[in-house]
Amino acid sequence: MGASLENHRPHEVVIVGGGFGGLYTAKALKNVKNVNVTLIDKRNFHLFQPLLYQVATGTLSPGDISSPLRAVLSKSKNTKVLLGEVNDIDPEAQHIIMGDKLIPYDTLVVATGAKHSYFGNDDWQKVAPGLKTVEDAIEIRRRIFSAFETAERETDPEKRRALLSFVIVGGGPTGVELSGAIAELAYKTLEEDFRNIDTSETRILLLQGGERILPFVAPELSKSAAESLQALGVEVYTKTRVTDIDNEIVTFKQGDQVQQISSKTILWAAGTQASPMGKILAKRTGTECDRAGRVIVEPDLSIKGHQNIFVVGDLSSFSHQNGKPLPGVAPVATQEGEYVAKLVKKRLQGRTITPFKYNDYGNLAMIGQNAAVVDVGPFKLKGFPAWLFWLFIHIYFLIEFDSKVLVMIQWAWSYLTRKRGSRLITGKESLALAKVITQQPSMESR
Amino acid sequence: MGASLENHRPHEVVIVGGGFGGLYTAKALKNVKNVNVTLIDKRNFHLFQPLLYQVATGTLSPGDISSPLRAVLSKSKNTKVLLGEVNDIDPEAQHIIMGDKLIPYDTLVVATGAKHSYFGNDDWQKVAPGLKTVEDAIEIRRRIFSAFETAERETDPEKRRALLSFVIVGGGPTGVELSGAIAELAYKTLEEDFRNIDTSETRILLLQGGERILPFVAPELSKSAAESLQALGVEVYTKTRVTDIDNEIVTFKQGDQVQQISSKTILWAAGTQASPMGKILAKRTGTECDRAGRVIVEPDLSIKGHQNIFVVGDLSSFSHQNGKPLPGVAPVATQEGEYVAKLVKKRLQGRTITPFKYNDYGNLAMIGQNAAVVDVGPFKLKGFPAWLFWLFIHIYFLIEFDSKVLVMIQWAWSYLTRKRGSRLITGKESLALAKVITQQPSMESR
């Protein structure tokens, strides 16, 4: 740890994961003297996840919200990017294991994030995909636009109804943003594009387990968000639990009332669980994980008994601030990453640092054109001012990486003109679509 | 044909294929009185193919150069877009067959284009992909960037050399533009991104069978293009034939001299053959195809003996102008489509039209930043003026569809700043990359 001070060997920081937590750790260690950084990720790019729903609904392209890790860090001459998958950790020997390669570390930062959780119903995954990766977004985009295409050819009114029914499970930011975007798509963007179907007949159901959507914002903003969604045409159900998804029929329960809807497009935005790295860490260090599989960290984000192993971002369970773990959002991950970088620097100088404290600048969610909710400190905005603020914040953070100013202008432009250039149905399965549609004009419920 | 004049039933035009030929036929028939148009394509979008190489090399995203067919034609109220695959044609009954559905036509326009040809060496396809579809471009992008990533981890100098060797087969516009773009990538864009490899050691070979690259432009511009490519670092081989591709070794012959190069990234830009629709047409109508499988058309682009069936674009073999078939490029397809639309309109008015004549406005090819060649009538440009002209022309045609002005600005911006936001390694196979790299730091030659 402090060893490098004495022997002048550079202090080796290994970061696993190039999301917000890992990338901001690396960025904050840019060209720090006597520190070498190795950032390892399975992908060659950082994904700006807060805008991923816009790829899923055809407004942006994957490239618009992705920045090659090497490009972001090319000026960080002390930083190496490795493409690869970490298989194991050896805290005694202080190295990680990638295939047959060992990578030694002085400080290890684990930031491998989270994936979807279907709360034990893993068979739902296939029929109700979640939105975490670029591939997820392209798959959801394919499903949404294929549903409209197939409906255009469908003659059976019941099947057509199922094709024009969209169910979004989970009323957090992703669920709210997805359902708002699909509503705008169906009722505005695609209005003139079809000849046989009337896209205004589309039903969009947002199912939320808790008492209100967007539980992290103030109650009056939750209410305003629900009203905005309803004004757009989304049916918002709260206190509603999905009890079954089978054969493209969603069964859900609101109080004692059980309802069913036949839907070809079911999207999952309900739960997350920690990535497998959590379990590996627990096994190797004896540390504890919370119910969602997240690693419980100390006030300085390290693991109990391992002062030089840190966990940041969605994989981290930090509850020293108000008893509840911090939410899995980008600002938390970013601040955690920057904190760990600062701690490492101070420690190398032989100094200490106060415990991590998350500065909650608030919450944002986009509902649709000209509507959003913003809950930032004393500011509680809704409607158009909130939308403008949302746009500004996202531009601000997006350009930090990659000068994607023009992307955001383009995005705002296509948003205002309701054009969606990126509504492509692509991928291997997309070619099957033409065949399926061709061969089965009145297709079976599969 | 003229039938609709008498009975006032709308004249049904069915167009198969939404590339330049089919789309421009449909656009030119927009809201024409008493004409119904049905455009059928396997994909839900039109692809601006002249810029596809920029997706393959990470400058643009697929969404930037794709326009949803429904959106392009949404104001054409007489036009229906169908997603599907045409299986057969019945010229006697005057309908096409899609699965179990029959679609009757009065006029049929076939514009299904061409695909790669490996001149009988179909086993080369897997190791040397061509560039026709969005999926091709994403796959080539994956291969190019994965090669650099894998090289970064490779310790064996020979294997590293194979990873940093790129062979492009075919010296037409696609081959020239691909090799120029890869050169800029290796020698400029990625210069600072890697720590273990020196990307300036990259070798890029462009192999052209004929006497000169870009055979469609004037000889002095071919020469200038070759010089520009060489200045960028591309090794240009003319009069060179590939005799074998096996085990990632390309064997090629220039005169009597046989050479071999070990390369992990081999790209095919050499030949095309007509889509299978050509054979179906030949079988059903008794018409002839040329050596490349293209349908030989009459001076009015119809098929011999079938005045109401037209073939336009890359599938069409039109040699009434100067004895040689017109090349398979976008301007030819566009003009052919517009001609057929005009012919249909005139015919409905009981009038005739002079044979099709292609107005050759010239040829363009982009070589790299600030360099291109333009051979347009009296103008033979090279270098920066040619580059500006190339940019202007492509902006002009791209915005015709989709107001993608901002895309082009973004493109020019990223081109000038050498940033490439879209160099993503995505798709199912991309996740395997991390595993392969991890498990086999010194991987086998596969």
Image: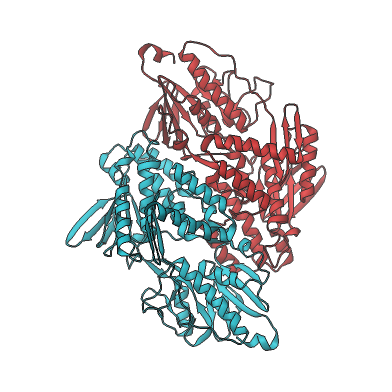
Chain colours: A red, B cyan
Left-right relation of B172 to B98: left
B30 w.r.t. A365: above or below: below
Residue A48 at what x, y percent from top left?
Answer: 57, 39
Between B360 and B172, which is closer to the camera in this rendering? B360
Single out the residue that lies furthest toward the left.
B256
Compared with B351, B295 (above or below) is above
Note whether residue B294 is visible: yes
Give whichever of B417, B18 is nearer the camera. B417
At x 34%, y 34%, the residue is: B196
On the image, the x and y values in percent for residue B359 come to 45, 72
- With respect to residue B385, does B323 lie above or below? below
- Position of residue B7 relative to residue A168, above or below, is below
Q: Is residue A295 visible?
A: no
* Image quadrant assignment for residue A162: bottom right
**Residue A369 horizontal side relative to residue B181, left or right:** right
Compared across the picture, whether B187 is left or right of B282 comes to left
